[in-house]
Structure formats: structure tokens, C-alpha cells
Amino acid sequence: MVRFLSATLAVALMASLGAVMAADDSKKSDSIFAKTENGSPNIQSIDAIAFGPNGALLIGDSKGAQLVAIDTKDTTARPWKAEAIANFNEKVAARLGTKAKDVEISSLTVNRASGKAYLVVRKLDEKKSVLLTVDGDGKIGEVELDKVDYVAVPLPKADKVAVKRITDVAYAKDRILVGAASTEEFSSKVYSIPTPLDPAKKASGFSTETYHVAHGRWETKAPMQTLIPMEQNGKKYVVGAFQCTPIVRYPLDEVKKGAQVKGTSYIELGHGNMPRSMFAYSKGDKSYLLVNNHRMERMHKATPVGPSPYWVARVDMSVFDETEKVNKNATWRVEKGSAKPIAESEKLAKVIEDYHGTMFMTKLNDKQALVIKDDKKTGLTLVALDLP
């Protein structure tokens, strides 16, 4: 999400960050809704979730080929006080009246307006997804989708072209961004939906062309697994992370509907990894991306990054100032074909040991991330960690 910096700090950081995070969602004057309808939205799948301002829940629905925004009216801010919740998967299963083996957590985000966590849980025995919440005291609740105020915006489709999978959604102040894979030849897509939301305002999409650093070639099929909006020097971008793991930036200004947009690859986090989530934050006079990844099983066994296949990298935002070390000359975090870090690259991309085992991650507040960690002794643990 995009947060505008103070004038003094913005000057200091503009070269590397601009205004990466979106305006403070807690401001009640902000609204992404032009108008809503009340009822039960026809959500066929819940594949990605995020929050816009003032408690607006964004849901990417692959099967329905749509973006659904729900006014949760969850805007009473409460601090996060919960200690680490061990055996979290068992507690989630108990809330749903089933066993831990029959549930699968697939997404985690935080409503910054209230500080409450929202997660998508797949009930494997019923083959359906439900939305749960965790408040600052650690209490688990369920989100009812009956009689809500919502807007549903269909994603573009044409003859023999359809959305196969939505990978991520993000609020970017003047628009909502949706990352997806489609059935067309240039299948890596980004959809842009103008705000304030109105079903009459159509979404537009463009295809991405990416220099995949580890593969050594330009590619158009692999979708962004996670994305965030970014502004730098008055220009708007979307930053995405892909499997194996380049971090790439694409321009958003003056992009024509249906265009094929070339990105710029800035850093390669390592072959054999799948990015799962990403967010930007500032600490002191520095600004960073935090990216959590899953290392493929065979790669983890051969060249582990840490004790768990789930690991987190902190990327210095100054990487986006680079003009020469990009695409085929982009920086590698590790030596090619191994997991051995390159000493010089560690200044730009550092593995955060305290975050080892992080399966899901989202920004909780300006000082903490909320994560779900995999611990073989105690199952899954939900815990707030200090931002590195």
C-alpha cells in the first residue's frame, strides 16, 4: 500500500523510494467506493486478498474473473496485543469445527484501519474457502459475506481468452492492481481498475514482458506471484516478483489497453524460489522491500537458504536507482547455481534469520510484520515480528 512521506523525508528518500506505500488507510475521508450494492456477492473463489483504505477488503476471484471490494465497516483501531499463537492451524480448524489436517491457510493480510488480521482458509473436506479474522487479542472470528455492501468489477476477456489465475491484488490510490495469468499467448497480465470503484468503470489490462535473470531470457508467460505499487520521481510503477526470483518494475503511466509492457529487472534473489508476498517499509533513513519465499524441495535439500524452505529477504530500495546493472546485468544475491551469498550483494539483499520458517507475511504496522511461521514442533505459529 502506498504511504506518502513527509516533505523532508520524501526529499531524502525520493531517489530510492518516492512514495512506495499508499496513503494511510486509516483516514476516513478516503473511500474507494463511488457506489455499492447490498447483498451477497457471487464470489466463486478467494485467491488473493488485500485492503484498501477505510476497511475496504479486496478479493481476487479467479473462477469469477472479477475483483470484489467489500466495505467491511471494520474501522475501529485496536492495537495488536496478542502473544505468539502456537498451534495456530489447530485453533483455526477448531473455529471451523474440523481438524487441522482438513484446513489449509492460503492468504494473510491486515486491515490497517482496524489492525485486525484477515486470512483465507481452505476447508479441504468441503472444497471451499472461508474468510477468518484474528483481532489484537488473538480472538479468531469468521467473516460473513451475506448482506454486505460491495462492488464487483469483471476483468476483461475476449474470444477464447480468459483469466486462469489471480495471483495478487494491491491498492494503489488511484487504481487497484490485479496480477494474473491468462489463457492468451502473452499470458502474464496486470489489470488496472480505476478508483473510486464503480461497476460501470471497466478494468483494463496489459501483458508483461520480463527479463528473467536466472533463465537468461525475456519471458511473457510466468505471472507475477506478488506485486506492490510504487511511485518514484513523480512516475507510477508496479513492482513484481516472479518464480526463480527476479524483482521487476513496470511503468504504469501512459500504458495503453492491451499493450505488452517491458519491465526492468533489478535483482535476482536466487534460482529455485517462489515468492509468496512482499511489502515496502521505511526504517530510520532507509527504505526496504521485504519478500518471503518458498524454496523448492529439491533445491532446499541440495542448497538450502536456511533451516526451513520458507525464508525472507530484505531488499534495499536503492536498487531501483540502478540504470546499468539491470536485466541481463542485474545483481545476483547468490552465486549462480548455488545458495552461497555474494558478499557485495548482501548490502542490497539480506536474508533475515529471525524470519526463517515464514510461510505467510504481511505488514502489521510501521514497526512490525505479522507472520505465520512453520514450526515442526508446534505446528504453525501466528506472531508479530519487528521489522528488520
Image (spheres, rainbow, N blue to C red):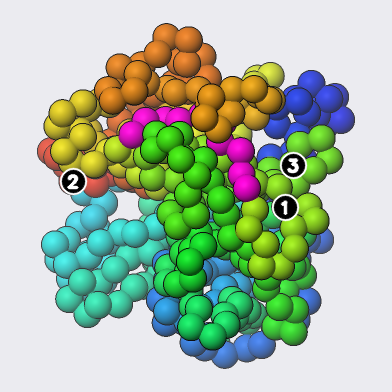
Task: Locate residue 93: give its quadrant.
Answer: bottom left
- Amino acid under disc 2: Gly
Q: Residue at x 33, y 39 (%)?
A: 273
In magenta, the rendered stretch is: 262-271
Q: Which residue is mark 3?
A: 231
Q: Which residue is mark 2?
A: 379
Q: Residue at x 43, y 35 (%)?
A: 216
Crowding at dot 2, Cα within 10 Å, few <14 / some 14-19 / many 20+, comes out as: some
Left or right of 118? Residue 202 is right
Q: Residue at x 79, y 43 (%)?
A: 235
- Amino acid under disc 1: Leu
Left or right of 253? Residue 123 is left
Mark 1 vs mark 3, CA separation in Å: 10 Å
Mark 2 vs mark 1, CA separation in Å: 41 Å
Say whether disc 2 or disc 3 marks the residue closer to the N-terminus. Answer: 3
As helix, strand or loop, the secondary structure at mark 3 comes to: strand
